[in-house]
Amino acid sequence: MSYPQKIAVVTGASSGIGAATARRLDAEGYHVYALARREDRLKALGVGVPVACDVTDDAAVASFASSLDRVDLLVNNAGGAHGAEPVAEARIDDWQWMFDVNVLGTLRMTRALLPLMTQGGTVITISSTAGLIVYEGGGGYAAAKHAQTALVETLRLELCGQPIRVVEIDPGMVKTDEFALNRFDGDASRAASVYAGVAEPLVAEDIAECVAWCAGLPRHVNIDRLVVRPVAQAAQHKVHRAAAG
């Protein structure tokens, strides 16, 4: 089915950055396909076309790709972290999940949709500052995000000469409803401690703004890598926190 609007596909669109990005691109005039595992959350989002699709499922990704005849913008956002144990105590299942979603999910979607960018397009991958520098307790997540960064950098080299832009956005501290909560197996107090004393961490809409900006630049302009942190976070290990009380 053809549309006069530009076609955008956003993964992990049921919450957080993905949901904010789907809303923002819809406001920018894109025909948005909002993908995630939780179809009920996608329907509640109220924008675009909700598509129940697990990026770790080869058949689901292939089936979705076969339903389209064109894609102008792919936003690889599906991902996340599980656990914060030291490497010596790491849970293999957590690392496996992080690689499956962050790395192989990005690979599946990119590989499936690139052939639909016959007139040119943009691939934006939401990675993390954890893909640039490691930190204690973040071995599995940082390893997955480093791999995701390597995928994006390689893709850009391999597509040189084709009219496809390849963009990486690396957020630092972003406060969303689910990221930290999922990382700590639903432990709300532990999740809240990540942002304790930080006056203004980034929010999902800030990253959606970055996506819209990168996608909206002239076709000959490519933002290779955009690192985005709140003012309170000078580096991965340097965060200003107000004293309690």
Image (spheres, grey):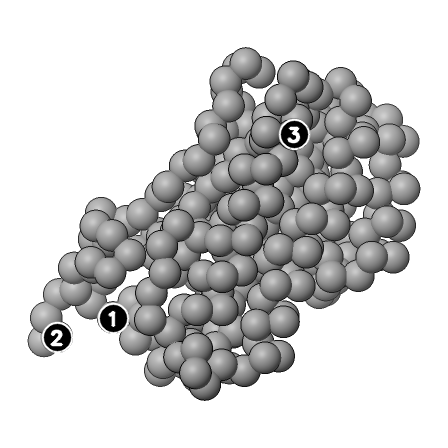
Closest to the camera, between mark 1 and mark 3, is: 3
Residue appearing at x 24%, y 60% in the figure: 237
Q: Nearer the viewer, residue 40 or 57?
A: 57
Gap in Å between the C-alphas at discs 3 and 2?
50 Å
Residue appearing at x 77%, y 38% in the figure: 113
Q: Which mark is residue 118?
A: none
Q: How many C-alpha atoms fall within 10 Å of the one at disc 2: few (<14), some, or many (≥20)?
A: few
Closest to the camera, between mark 3 and mark 2, is: 3
| First-in-chain label (2 vs 1) | 1
Q: Examine the image and state in which quarter residue 25 appears.
A: top right
Gap in Å between the C-alphas at discs 1 and 3?
42 Å
Amino acid at the residue labelled 3: Glu
| First-in-chain label (1 vs 3) | 3
Gap in Å between the C-alphas at discs 2 and 1?
9 Å
Q: Which mark is residue 196?
A: 1
Q: Which residue is mark 3?
A: 158
Q: Nearer the viewer, residue 105 or 205?
A: 105
